[in-house]
Amino acid sequence: MSYIYFIIQVVFIILIGITGPIIPQSLPVLAGAAIGVLGMIWALWAMRLSNLNMIPDSKHKSIFVTSGPYKIVRHPMYASVLLVTLMLVINDFTLLRIIFWLVLLIDLHFKFLYEEKILLKKYSEYADYKNNTKRLIPFIY
């Protein structure tokens, strides 16, 4: 199942990218996309590349990260991907692109639910972490 979530994610990010410009035209939308890209960089830095896994399965020698953006939300990479792609959709809004984004949102939702089940089994402290941090949006969700 993890590979299916990953493939759907990649396909719909590509579809959003090829159906419109990839550099936003308006300053507010560009700023939103830049915040998303910076969020990705911050999450990658906190996670360390050796710990990164594109599929939602846990690596054998992975470490549990709760610092950096992971202190604020449990899935900062997913939040960043959703923000950047949403900014691209807003920049060149079409019904097709919003459908692509909604499919991506649904896929990432199921992907992080799947990932959280794995993390709960692997790390005893994940349950506490889960109760004290939001999934994607600080203080909200």
Image (cartoon, rainbow, N blue to C red):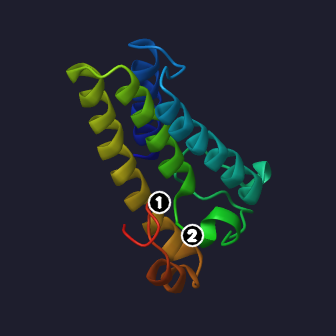
Q: Confirm or deny contact between disc 1 and disc 2 (CB under 8 A).
A: no
Circle 1 crowding by C-alpha within 10 Å: few under 14, some 14–19, many from 20: some
Along the line of sight, the residue nearer the viewer: 16 or 130: 16
Q: Position of residue 15 (x, y in %)?
A: 40, 19
Which corner quadrant holds the C terminus? bottom left
**Which residue position holds label 1?**
115
Q: Position of residue 83 (x, y in %)?
A: 46, 43
Label located before the other in sequence (1 or 2):
2
Question: Which residue type does callout 2 highlight?
Answer: Ile
Residue located 34% across and 44% down the image: 105
Residue 88 higher or lower than 78, as above or below: above
Residue 124 higher or lower than 55, as above or below: below
Q: Position of residue 61 (x, y in %)?
A: 75, 63
Along the line of sight, the residue nearer the viewer: 42 or 47: 42
Q: Secondary structure at mark 2?
A: loop
**Which residue position holds label 2?**
72
Please tell me in which quadrant of the rendered image residue 41 appears: top right
Circle 2 crowding by C-alpha within 10 Å: few under 14, some 14–19, many from 20: some
Residue located 30% across and 28% down the image: 100
